[in-house]
Amino acid sequence: MAAYDVFRALADPSRRALLDRLNERNGQTLRELCAGLDMARQSVSKHLDILEAANLVTTVRSGREKLHYLNPVPIQEIYERWIGKFERGRLQALSDLKRRLEGSNVFGSSEYYFGIISGVIRYFCIVLFFMALLNAPVYSKAELAAQQAYNNRWYGGGLKDYKGDFIPTLNELQVSVFVNSLTGPFIKDWFSLLLINTIPPGGLTKPPVIDIQH
């Protein structure tokens, strides 16, 4: 019945408010607990009697007044009975994970710096790759048609209605991702010195058209 009395006492928000006030400042009188509450003195006294019956509040006589003190032991017992045992598994799993992560420190304190270096290298590789694509030569419509016909002949395998568009050309990738994008023209205009130059010293020459006749 002790647990039932505790749950019953905690079920009322007014009684929980009294416990909160005692948690903020222990040893208050009935008059002090009534201050600021929208309850009659008699109602506060009844709530305190229920809390005292549940052993959540203890009282000590001080002259003509009675001081009220919070007793957290019943709440701790409820935690251990209803909450603590359900959290033990989670806490044990977190502890095991912590030990495994700490035990896998192969490079010691240098592991952090290796991660930074690898991240910087990966970033510059991605930037160089996209800049190379941005500055690749643009093919004419005739050259694109020839490329699609070549794809149709060698990769279509006789499929009906295949027009050679399963494999996108480089120009299609440039136009869809970089030319029509928000960042592509900006990079071409402001970071042209960092782009890979594909124009030979003798001037711009078109790439050879793939011969599909043979």
Image (tube, helix red, strand yellow):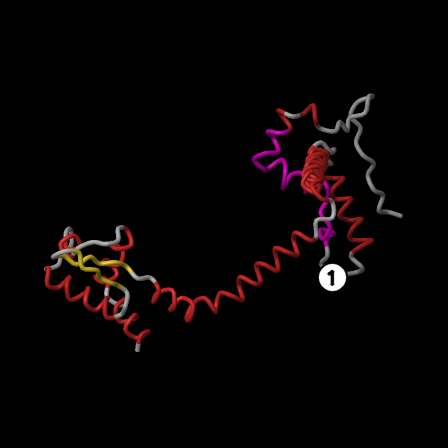
Part of the protein shown in magenta: 163-187
Marks counted in the figure total: 1
The N terminus, quarter of image: bottom left
In the rendered structure, does residue 25 fall within the stretch colored magenta?
Answer: no
Secondary element at tag 1: loop
Q: Is residue 16 left or right of residue 39?
A: right
Q: Residue at point 81% right, 53% down?
A: 153
Q: As displayed, is residue 61 above or below residue 78?
A: above
**Residue in the picture at 38% in, 64% down:** 76
Relative image position of residue 129 (x, y in whole percent): 72, 37
The percent coordinates of residue 48 (x first, y second) are 19, 64
Name the foreground residue: 66 vs 111: 66
Quarter residue 75 falls in: bottom left
Query: Is 176 a magenta residue?
Result: yes
The image position of residue 116, as x and y in percent, is: 67, 38
What's the residue at 23%, 54% (across, down)? 27
Q: Which residue is mark 1?
A: 160
Question: Which is nearer the eye, 211 or 93?
Answer: 93
Residue type beneath disc 1? Lys
Q: Nearer the viewer, residue 211 or 165?
A: 165
**Where does the image place residue 100, in percent across and percent down from the top left?**
66, 56
- Tag 1: Cα neighbours inside 10 Å, few (<14), some, or many (≥20)? few
Q: Nearer the viewer, residue 150 or 90?
A: 90
Say whether residue 84 is left or right of residue 170.
Answer: left
Please state if 90 lies on the left or on the right of 187 as rendered. left
**Placement of 55 over or under 176, stated as above or below:** below
Tell me if residue 213 comes above or below residue 156 in the rendering: above
- Residue at 80% across, 48% down: 150
